[in-house]
Image: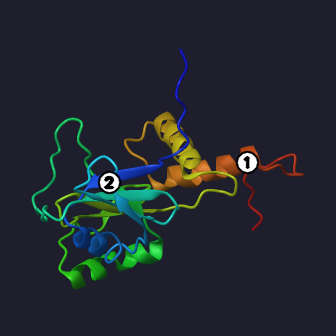
């Protein structure tokens, strides 16, 4: 038996309401360019809109002009999607409260996740959206996942309850030491002052 190895998310498709609501939210609020539009090939009553969330991958929406926005929170039953987290820069995150407030969009306010900051709000259909901003940049040649798994191992080894910035900093230091060669035979911390 062998695995079907994935290499990233190809796209996420959501059920939308009418076409303009989707365009106004995904491009008009979140800034995702509207890049492709065609009929839903499985349902001639729907259109299939494609948006670029910023990394060249896709978020797509099935739209039907007979469906109207429903502001009730989407189901959180077993098997349902809880929320969609979108990456934003520190600069954008620091403006999120002001920009959501100026639109009258209710939100959670900034939430400390230890390794990232988050803010939550719902789209016009009641689907929970998270704007997520990492508190670190991975070293060159590493991914956020490399830092996260290394920080996790450090946290568990120390018996700490949840991840914190000290685990991230120590993970980054470890990754640099493990991946980057040095001419020094002793790379331990020094006190030159």
Color theme of the render: rainbow
Q: Where is residue 73 in the image (x, y as percent from the top left)?
A: 13, 56
Q: Residues within 10 Å of mark 1 (few under 14, many from 20)?
A: few
Q: Where is residue 80 in the image (x, y as percent from the top left)?
A: 23, 41
When the figure is inspected, residue 59 is found, relative to residue 179, above or below; the finding is below
Q: What secondary structure is found at the residue carrying circle 2?
A: loop
Specify few, some or many for label 2: CA neighbours under 10 Å numbering under 14, 14-19, or 20 or more.
Answer: some
Residue at x 49%, y 57% (from the top left corner): 57
Instruction: Give the residue displayed 29% in from the left and 82% down from the top.
Output: 98
In the image, residue 185 lies at what x, y percent?
87, 46
Q: Determine which residue is flagged by label 2.
A: 40
**Can residue 46 be seen in this snapshot?**
yes
Instruction: Relative to 75, say whether 115 is above or below.
Output: below
Q: In this view, does 91 lie to the left or right of 13?
A: right
**180 relative to 47 in the view: left or right:** right
Q: Name the one closer to the observer, 36 or 150.
A: 36
- Closest to the camera, between mark 2 and mark 1, is 2
Q: Residue at 17% of width from left, 71% of height from top?
A: 106
Above or below, comparing residue 30 to residue 55 in the picture: below
Q: Label 2 vs label 1: CA separation?
A: 50 Å
Which residue does the numbered mark 1 point to in the structure image?
177
**Which of the 4 image quarters holds residue 87?**
bottom left
Query: Mark 1 or mark 2, which is nearer the start of the sequence?
Result: 2
């Amino acid at each position: 038996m062998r695995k079907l190895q994935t290499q990233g998310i190809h796209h996420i498709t959501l059920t939308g309401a009418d076409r303009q609501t989707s365009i106004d939210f995904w491009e008009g609020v979140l800034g995702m360019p509207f890049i492709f539009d065609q009929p839903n090939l499985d349902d001639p009553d729907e259109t299939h809109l494609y948006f670029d969330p910023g990394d060249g991958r896709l978020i797509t929406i099935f739209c039907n002009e007979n469906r109207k926005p429903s502001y009730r929170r989407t189901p959180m039953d077993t098997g349902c999607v809880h929320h969609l987290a979108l990456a934003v820069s520190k600069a954008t995150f620091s403006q999120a409260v002001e920009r959501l407030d100026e639109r009258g969009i209710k939100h959670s306010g900034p939430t400390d996740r230890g390794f990232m900051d988050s803010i939550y709000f719902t789209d016009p259909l009641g689907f929970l959206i998270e704007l997520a901003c990492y508190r670190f940049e991975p070293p060159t040649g590493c991914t956020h996942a490399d830092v996260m798994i290394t920080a996790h191992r450090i946290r568990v080894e120390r018996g700490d309850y949840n991840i914190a910035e000290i685990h991230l900093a120590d993970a980054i230091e470890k990754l640099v030491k493990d991946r980057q060669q040095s001419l020094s035979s002793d790379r331990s911390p020094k006190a030159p002052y």
